[in-house]
Amino acid sequence: MKYDAENVFAKIIRDEAPAHRVYEDDSTLAFMDIMPQVDGHTLVIPKCPAVDIFDVPAEMLTRTIAVTQRVAVAVRSAFSADGVMVAQLSGAAAGQTVFHLHFHVLPRHAGIDFRLHAKDVAPEAVLAEHAERIRQALPAD
Ligand code: AMP
């Protein structure tokens, strides 16, 4: 699949679409999933155009997964999670719905199930509060 520069994550990177950002540097961005499957569901993306795991230079993938680890640390702390799930879907057959590479970071609590994937948009105020909690919990550089 050819990269579509008009996909919603590309627009978020260019600040043409809104997002509750939790972390940003020259090459990566992390923001709240607007249809969270659990409270605190965060996405981490490289800023370079990459459709999926097969389409990203190794160096950018390395940077993105390092930021994913930092975000996972923050999410675990901010939501007092028992565990953290990191997921990456490549290809429609795998369930990918936005065709810009991203890692899902989901705090998990024993006995609490997921909500449905990409279904219910969370209220802005809730996403803003969760983003603030994660920003506060990010480890120092
Ligand atoms: P995937 O199915 O792995 O491609 O995941 C795409 C994710 O992006 C889903 O969890 C959606 O809820 C989420 N999503 C879609 N549009 C937006 C958006 N504008 N801002 C934040 N998250 C989004």
Image (cartoon, rainbow, N blue to C red):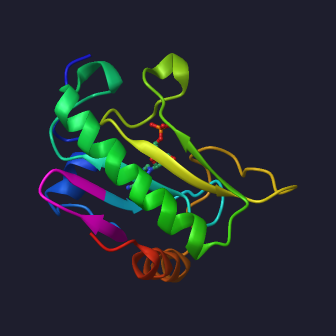
Specify the quadrant that holds the C terminus: bottom left
Residue 63 in the image: x percent, y percent? 24, 44
Q: Residue at x 83, y 56 (%)?
A: 110
Q: How many marks?
A: 0
Q: Position of residue 94 (x, y in %)?
A: 53, 21
Nearer to me, 122 or 25: 25
Position of residue 4 relative to residue 67, above or below, is above
Is residue 23 covered in magenta? yes
Q: Which residues are magenta?
A: 20-29
Locate residue 32, reporting x and y percent: 44, 63
With respect to residue 25, does 64 lie above or below? above
Q: Evaluate whether residue 20 shows in this view.
A: yes
* Residue 42 locus on image (x, y percent): 47, 58
SS assignment for the magenta stretch, majority: strand
Q: Is residue 126 left or right of residue 140?
A: right
Name which quarter of the figure residue 135 lies in: bottom left
Q: Quadrant of residue 80?
A: bottom right
Q: Residue at x 48, y 29 (%)?
A: 89
In the displayed structure, does residue 99 sit left or right of residue 121?
left
Q: Is residue 21 above or below residue 2?
A: below
Task: Tell me, yes or no, if residue 4 can be seen here.
Answer: no
Give the residue at the far right of this rendering.
111
Magenta segment includes 2: no
At a point 40% along the width and 50% down the height, the residue shown is: 68
Which corner quadrant holds the N terminus? top left
Question: Can you tell which quarter of the image residue 102 is in?
Answer: top left
